[in-house]
Image: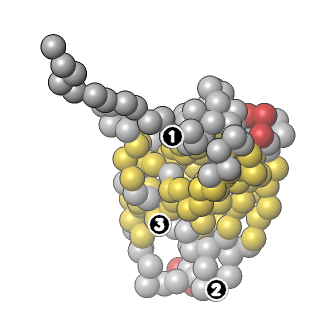
Amino acid sequence: YFVFQTSFAVEIIEPKITVLKTVDDGIIDISGNNVTLGDSMWYQLRFQNTGNDSATNTAIRDLLPINVDLNEASLELPIGVTYTYTIPTPTSGGILEFTIPDAIVTKGATFYDIRFEVTVTDQCNDLRDACENKIDNVAFAYYTGLDSGIEISDDPSFYGLDNCDFGLSGATNFLVDV
């Protein structure tokens, strides 16, 4: 007898911060639905480290659509999560950046939620980009592996999960009914 097949496995040690971004009207999922001027929407960022290494220096950056305004008072954050907000300009949307404490992105940690409300500008004259009739939104995760030292940047959020719990890539889209 002789060895017919030899095999080995290599396990890559790295964190994997999965961010699931959904949108609702406060109750019902409105992904892909039309919204009108002045409508409010709630974004939820559900994040979890699904990798086999703990993460450090974790941040989630949410590039808000150009024609919406953040209601800062609505922010619901897990304990220890902090944020900075860059207000929108005439040419770009606002930027929300969340700093995530290392203690909640360890290997095997549970998921955590960030929620906040945005409002579509209520007057046509207030639209920062009158030619833009879509509200596209995606968040990005940035982090480093605690043991591996692997740096991950621009890891995009998912808008949903398929039947095998794989993330569905892409932005959450709305058409503004103007």
Q: Which amino acid does label 2 sit on?
A: Pro
Note whether residue 117 is visible: no
> Whole-percent x and y of residue 36?
47, 63
**Circle 1 is placed at which residue position?**
12
Note whether residue 63 is visible: yes
Which quadrant of the rendered structure holds the N terminus? top left
Q: Tell me what residue is drawn at x 68 percent, y 67 percent.
A: 95
Describe the colour scheme in one phrase: secondary structure
> Whole-percent x and y of residue 116?
67, 49
Is the Cβ of the residue at disc 3 closer than 8 Å to that at disc 2?
A: no
Decide which of tag 1 and tag 3 comes sooner along the chain. 1
**Circle 2 is placed at which residue position?**
90
Count neighbours of disc 3 (C-alpha within 10 A) and say few if under 14, some if 14 to 19, many if 20 or more: many
Secondary element type, mark 1: loop
**Circle 3 is placed at which residue position?**
135
Count neighbours of disc 2 (C-alpha within 10 A) and say few if under 14, some if 14 to 19, many if 20 or more: few
Q: Which of 16 and 10 is in front in this view?
A: 10
> Residue 30 bears which disc, if any?
none
Which quadrant of the rendered structure holds the C terminus? bottom left
In the depicted structure, whether residue 167 falls above or below residue 177: above
Q: Nearer the viewer, residue 37 or 8?
A: 8
Residue farthest toward the top in the current orientation of the protein: 1
Query: In the figure, is residue 116 to the left or right of 82?
Result: left
Q: What residue type is labelled 1?
A: Ile
Name which quarter of the figure residue 111 lies in: top right
Q: Distance between the residues labelled 2 and 1?
A: 44 Å
Decide which of tag 2 and tag 1 comes sooner along the chain. 1
Secondary element type, mark 2: loop
Secondary element type, mark 3: strand
